[in-house]
Amino acid sequence: MITLDKILEGLMCRYQERVKDVSKITQALVKKELIRSIADIENDHIAFRTIGVPQLGIQSLEKIFLHHGYQAREDFYFENKKINARWYAPPADRLPRIFISELRVNDFADDIQALIRSFTDEVKEDPVNQLDLNNSVQVDEFLHSSLWRTPTWTEFNTLAEVSEYASWTIYNKYYLNHFTISVHNLPEPFNTLEAFNDLLQSIGIHLNNAGGFIKTSRDGLLKQSSSVSQLIDATFANHEVHQISGSYVEFAERKVLPEFTDLSPDQIGREHRRDGFETANADKIFESTYSSQTGKEKK
């Protein structure tokens, strides 16, 4: 799995450069002697956003990860946000799960569809089919490349008025949307999301409060929270520079399944904890890049 490791390393390297909260959080955990370095953090999952058109979307991007041993697990539909999603189990427990979502382009008004397709139509065929998936450098370059032209500030805001997911994805392309710290594997007392969120807020991390600071699954076994996306300077067409949402950090606590609660802590592995995702939780996590969370008004 050397190639896969290199692909994931490339994603995380550029993500950390872009999301300053990652180093801020890591430094706080090191200072409290909860970890020695970021390598001690279990990455619960990483997430990508895509545009759902025939030559792109989930069916395209997933090919990279299926090729390297990931297995598709469950599909989700977010009606109000007009988004589909699918998650993938890794070939080894040390690797992150993957969550890929896509905009349901056909659900929008004709003029918005036309605007979105004016970008995606620049990609004439599935670009993943042209990659050597065993070449980590080639895959890494693809995941950080421009798939279509840079939007104008007007085009960006036209999309944001109907879908901030759409505007984010049209500008940011496949840049990693977030990575996720597995809170339950940290030393006590910070192995619960309540205590961990208190730590985050004490160091000035702004948390997504959509649906509450902690989003909890119906069975109570999956708890999630996230930072609010930091604003980045984005250069639009005609060299206009404006601040928009970049990426963010997520935090997950997966509780032990009822049938394994008698196990001692040193016996508990990933297979003993709640797996998968929850639609209601993810629906609110999406909003970590939305203006309602960042406080930046749409224009």
Image (cartoon, rainbow, N blue to C red):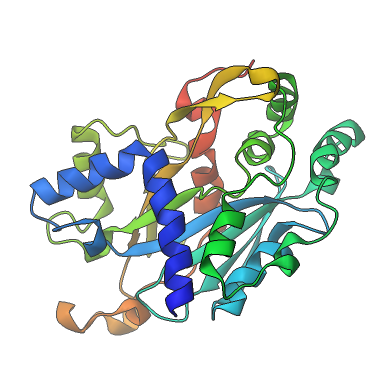
Quadrant where the image shows the N terminus: bottom left
> What's the residue at 51%, 50% (across, down)?
176
268 or 171, which is in the foreground?
171
* Residue 158, quarter of picture: top right
Q: Position of residue 209 (x, y in %)?
A: 41, 35
94 or 187, which is in the foreground?
94
Count of marks, rendered view: 0
Q: Position of residue 282 (x, y in %)?
A: 52, 52
Q: Is residue 264 visible?
A: no
> What's the residue at 31%, 44% (across, down)?
22
> What's the residue at 40%, 72% (across, down)?
95
> What's the residue at 61%, 70% (across, down)?
64
* Residue 159, quarter of picture: top right
172 or 135, which is in the foreground?
135
Which residue of the protein is positioned furthest toward the right in this rendering?
110
Say whether residue 133 is left or right of residue 268: right
The vertical placement of 182 against 208, above or below, is below
Say whether residue 28 is left or right of residue 270: left
Q: Position of residue 142 (x, y in %)?
A: 61, 56
Quadrant where the image shows the C terminus: top right
Q: Position of residue 50 (x, y in %)?
A: 67, 51
The vertical placement of 219 against 121, above or below, is below
Q: Is residue 163 visible?
A: yes
159 or 234, which is in the foreground?
234
The vertical placement of 250 against 198, above or below, is below
